[in-house]
Image (tube, rainbow, N blue to C red):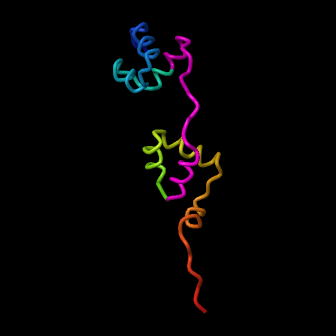
């Protein structure tokens, strides 16, 4: 398959100016996979930044019963990051009920 011609200078400029991958893909009408290949070919540094979210607020929101979709919107992260954080913090769904619902004793 023939390699698509892209203005590499413009791509580098957009990338360094902080454009998102989606913005760059839309500007050049290319897929995310093509963009990643070009970034690697051009030797551009990866932009991945460590997540900087309030862990306690995340924990509270998770235990309040918010879905992963709602958590991703609230904390402006992707859903896979939500899953990673839940796993790293060892949060458990069964604790949602224990943390926020009081169970009344069964009457004898």
- Point out the stretch of residues depicted in magenta: 37-64
Q: Is residue 10 above or below residue 22?
A: above
Could you say where residue 92 lies in the image, as x and y percent from the top left?
61, 57
Residue at 51% x, 19% y is 37
- Where is residue 98? Give x, y as percent: 59, 67
Which residue sits at x=59%, y=63%?
A: 94
Determine which quarter of the picture holds residue 22. top left
The vertical placement of 60 against 34, above or below, is: below
Q: Residue at x 56, y 35 (%)?
A: 51
Quarter of the figure with residue 9: top left
Q: Position of residue 35 (x, y in %)?
A: 46, 20
Residue 57 among those drawn in magenta: yes
Relative vertical location of residue 57 with respect to residue 20 in this rendering, above or below: below
Q: Residue at x 47, y 25 (%)?
A: 33
Horizontal relation, residue 18 to residue 52: left or right? left
Image quadrant occupied by the N terminus: top left
Camera-side residue of 93 and 7: 93
Q: Quadrant of residue 105?
A: bottom right
Is residue 84 magenta-colored?
no
Left or right: residue 64 versus residue 98 is left
């Amino acid at each position: 398959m023939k390699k698509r011609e892209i203005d590499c200078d413009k791509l580098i400029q957009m990338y360094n100016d902080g454009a998102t991958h989606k913005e760059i893909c839309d500007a050049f009408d290319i897929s995310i996979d093509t963009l990643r290949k070009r970034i690697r070919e051009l030797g551009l540094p990866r932009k991945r930044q460590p997540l900087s979210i309030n862990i306690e607020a995340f924990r509270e929101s998770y235990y309040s019963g918010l879905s992963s979709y709602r958590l991703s919107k609230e904390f402006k992260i992707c859903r896979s990051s939500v899953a990673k954080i839940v796993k790293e913090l060892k949060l458990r769904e069964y604790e949602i009920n224990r943390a926020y619902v009081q169970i009344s004793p069964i009457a004898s």
